[in-house]
Image (cartoon, helix red, strand yellow):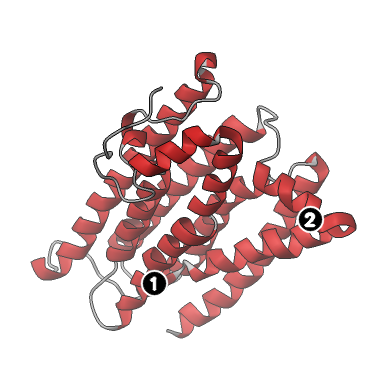
Amino acid sequence: MSIIVNSYTVTVLFTFSFMSLMWYWGKSRNNYAVIDVGWGLVIAGIYSLLVLPSSANLTAKLAILIPVLVWAIRLSGFLYFTRIRTNHPEDKRYAGFRESYGDKVHQKFFTNVFLLQGVLALLLAGPAIATDSLIISFETEILYLIPPILGLVLFIIGIVGETISDKQLHTFIQNKSNKGKVCDVGFWKYTRHPNYFFEWVIWLGIGIIPLRDTFSIISLFSPFFMFVLLRFISGVPFAEKYSLQSKGELFKKYQQTTNAFFPWFPKKNSIAR
């Protein structure tokens, strides 16, 4: 446990330093959307710093680190190549922040966006902490192998689902004939935010992997916290706000027929494309 405490101290310093560098990068590009790229990378760093020095065996370390690294590389890579490298305009959320921050725009972006997201990333470290002393091997009783297996299955479902969701939306937007329309194809037919739903499934899987005793229940705080963030704070509310501004009545009809988060069959009177 003392190793985890010491590692967490180092992790806090890493998080502050990393987010400071991301802020400087965003400031130099005059585009603070780089924080979205940094989100996955900082979490990957946090998990690495907590899991690698722990007393878990190699298999257990890989069981938690590989999913997190795969998630981070996929998410950050996708956002970098579709938003940053293409010089995509700054996300509407951050453009709105610029207006409200006024003369203190750079200072407030540093504290209210970059450092805040660093704190949120640290709060998602439950599975990494719960991995301490975890042993996974062929000799492990089958009862204790159920959480890692179930968690990895959910993770795979989540990563595949999120990748497909992102691809479906990207393809829809790239089609010029869809300008001004609402994406309601593929997974988007069953939930207004399949990308956020599958993101939560990913974290539910990661949270389940290290479960084995009372202490490891701390791991489940991460999927719970991620659900609250995505559904009620930074995910769905912001996306819905700007979709209503840009799509108006068309998006209101979409809201009436399609679940916001959990997938389900659309209600009658679905919108015409």
Question: Amino acid under label 1?
Answer: Phe
Give the answer, above or below, for where 33 lies relative to 20: above
Q: Which residue is mark 2?
A: 100
Q: Residue at x 48, y 37 (%)?
A: 251
Taking depth in this image into account, of 4 and 210 the one nearest to the observer is 210
Q: Where is residue 142 shown, x and y percent of the image? A: 9, 66
Q: Quadrant of the C terminus?
A: top left
Which residue, as the protein is rendered here, is positioned at the far left?
142
Taking depth in this image into account, of 38 and 181 the one nearest to the observer is 181
Local SS, label 2: helix
Tell me which label, 2 or 1, sits earlier in the chain: 2
Neighbor class of circle 2 (other Cα within 10 Å; few <14, some 14-19, many 20+) is few
Q: CA distance from mark 2 to mark 1?
A: 32 Å
Q: Which residue is mark 1?
A: 221
Quadrant of residue 85 in the image? top right
Q: Residue at x 66, y 70 (%)?
A: 13
Q: Where is residue 220 shown, x and y percent of the image? A: 34, 70
Neighbor class of circle 1 (other Cα within 10 Å; few <14, some 14-19, many 20+) is some
